[in-house]
Image: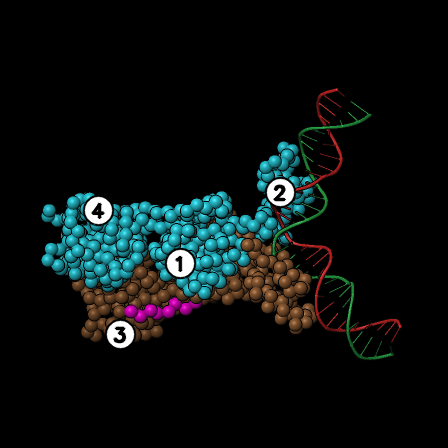
Chain colours: A cyan, B brown, C red, D green
Amino acid sequence: MKRIGIKDVAAAAGVSATTVSHILNAVEGKRINAETRATVLRVADELGYRPNKLARGLRTSRTYTVGFISDGIATTPHAGQIIQGAQDAGSEHDLLLLMLNTGGDPELERKAITLLIQHGVDGILYASMYHRIVEVPAQLRSVPTVLVDASSGDSAVPSVVPDEEQGGKTAAQTLLAHGHRRIGFVTNVDDIPASRGRLAGYRAALADEGIEFDPALVAADRSDAPGGYRAARTLLTSAARPTALFCFNDRMAMGAYRAAGELGLPIPAELSVIGFDNQELISENLHPALSTVALPHYEMGARAIALLQAVITTSEITGPAVQEVLRCPLVTRDSIASPSRS
Amino acid sequence: MKRIGIKDVAAAAGVSATTVSHILNAVEGKRINAETRATVLRVADELGYRPNKLARGLRTSRTYTVGFISDGIATTPHAGQIIQGAQDAGSEHDLLLLMLNTGGDPELERKAITLLIQHGVDGILYASMYHRIVEVPAQLRSVPTVLVDASSGDSAVPSVVPDEEQGGKTAAQTLLAHGHRRIGFVTNVDDIPASRGRLAGYRAALADEGIEFDPALVAADRSDAPGGYRAARTLLTSAARPTALFCFNDRMAMGAYRAAGELGLPIPAELSVIGFDNQELISENLHPALSTVALPHYEMGARAIALLQAVITTSEITGPAVQEVLRCPLVTRDSIASPSRS
DNA sequence: CTCGCCTGCCAAATCGATTGGGCAACTGGT
DNA sequence: ACCAGTTGCCCAATCGATTTGGCAGGCGAG
């Protein structure tokens, strides 16, 4: 059973392929008899005609295909959300995602881009698995590109990133709103936009309340559960123990839970905890469930596609590229309460 | 800067496009002068010629593109591994993955398949996000298809699934090897291949050791941390407390950890725990780190592509479809020890 | 010198769409 | 009856490759 093509429709409708094309694509400036149009539409529908995108792409050089390059799909559960967002947004324009991940290998990356271009993608999403500054491969300059969860040094390429500072501020404000005044910050040791931004947000929130920043309330360690455990333990055993902890991410929060458990500090009665990232596997399964700030992965994927689509259609009229910063929403669960005795 | 095509190469090499095509594709039965061949190859390389896959696909109806349909990319971190495996295996054949996830919506699914076919994919990977029996959409019958982490009722379509029974057996055997005799099974309530297979494996391992199966050692609840907590608590407070727990998955194990903590049973000194799934976010971050049985997601993705590739190239000579069952390996961490006093 | 056979290459058709440039047929005014 | 202007449609070229079926030219044999 061969697939039916435009000629089959044309034959069945008693017109030429040209006319069928004009009608199905609603070409402007072509005059078509209403009756003919109806017939063709009906016949096309009856036959279940689906234009061959290869042929169309060859002719129009629009393939309705977008490359999705990432430096590591497998390593983080976040990736899925970005993809999902991109996909959902893409489906509105009938865009398909061509996935490729390179593990960060520049050689592989070059090949990947070449391959995508060979396939005639309309554009490329270049996604990082954690928010960072990336070097944009030169080849990408010749293709519509949007950076996801990453930005370039120069701002020649549009990008979509989370608002780390607002997120950090939200986290701290949430604790402040419950009446906490001594809030520990369990952070990580890497100098990345996330740590910097979240710290800045934390400080900003304190400043708004007129609370002075106390470096003794900040403990840095590796950004995993053991690191969180150590950092939290340090803060919780210090002279003036904080009544709440803002953890750089949910993994560190998981460690903080253990520290609190060991020290006999029930959460949230004696210690409030807020995380970051909203890794549901952790935040939903901890006990009590962890309140946290979510990264807008889904939205980043969706917005990235929107930006890309804009670049594609308004081809080449690029001023300074859009650098979009997306809000990190609070996810309220059960790990925050007011401090025990004020 | 227009992309350079086969004609450009032909012109630069002073031959026809036909000849260039013959040479670059190493067409059998065509006689080509060695010198000409060398020239063309050199010129093609110098110009950086990359054949347009659209044009080629249009002519040959091989696009080197595979559709990846799943019922939920976002919901599980496993997906990434499957994709990664498929991608890595695919890259050996220059295959690209066209991602689409449908959230299980049959309507969306139909559209997705149609879209993929329009794009001329060489085949389709139909992936489930957890091991189960699926109904294969009728449209897929006309396209080479492989089921991933799923199997069809009839075995008309090739599939790749994990060996749940072997995995369950491995888990139980590991505990038995440490000298445990009373092993609790914290399982879930759904009747899916995973629960059935793992239970069967557990029973088989016991039988091998001549230990009688004791239904009192099996507790079922929801397959999340709270469920695991409740089930584990039930077992650990029962008359003859088990010295080890085999948990249906890592989330339930996470709950079991909490139960053990509350009951003052240090892991692994007083209680050994083994999980399933190897969700690193959990198993690596629990304390002590959780020994578990891994699902072969990466391998499933890779094998699926291999099977698909086989179907594609040996077109249509299908006997009964291959149903591949992949081994679940043990991942040893720190949650297992010998029972305290034997 | 001619015939047949290789050797080495190429012209043209093809895949399935889109698209610019017409071309008949009809209409209406004179 | 003639002409200009519409209307409604189609021919043929095009996108960039692959593939079929030759075609020239050289060479050895007769």
Task: Give the amino acid type for the residue marked by disc 3 in the picture.
Answer: Gly
Task: Give the amino acid type for the residue marked by disc 1 in the picture.
Answer: Glu
Find the distance from the CA under tag 2 to the CA under tag 4: 60 Å
What secondary structure prevails in the magenta region? loop
Residue at x-position 29% and y-position 69%: B333
Magenta highlight range: B326-333
Q: Does dot 2 land on a helix, a strand or a loop?
A: helix
Which residue position is annotated with label 1? A135
Which residue position is annotated with label 4? A205
Q: Chain of mark 2?
A: A
Identify the mark at residue A232; answer none if there is no mark: none
Going by the image, does B337 lie left or right of C23? left
* Residue B118 is at least partly visible in this image: no
Identify the mark at residue A21; answer none if there is no mark: 2
Residue at x-position 59% and y-position 52%: A58
Marks 3/2 same chain:
no
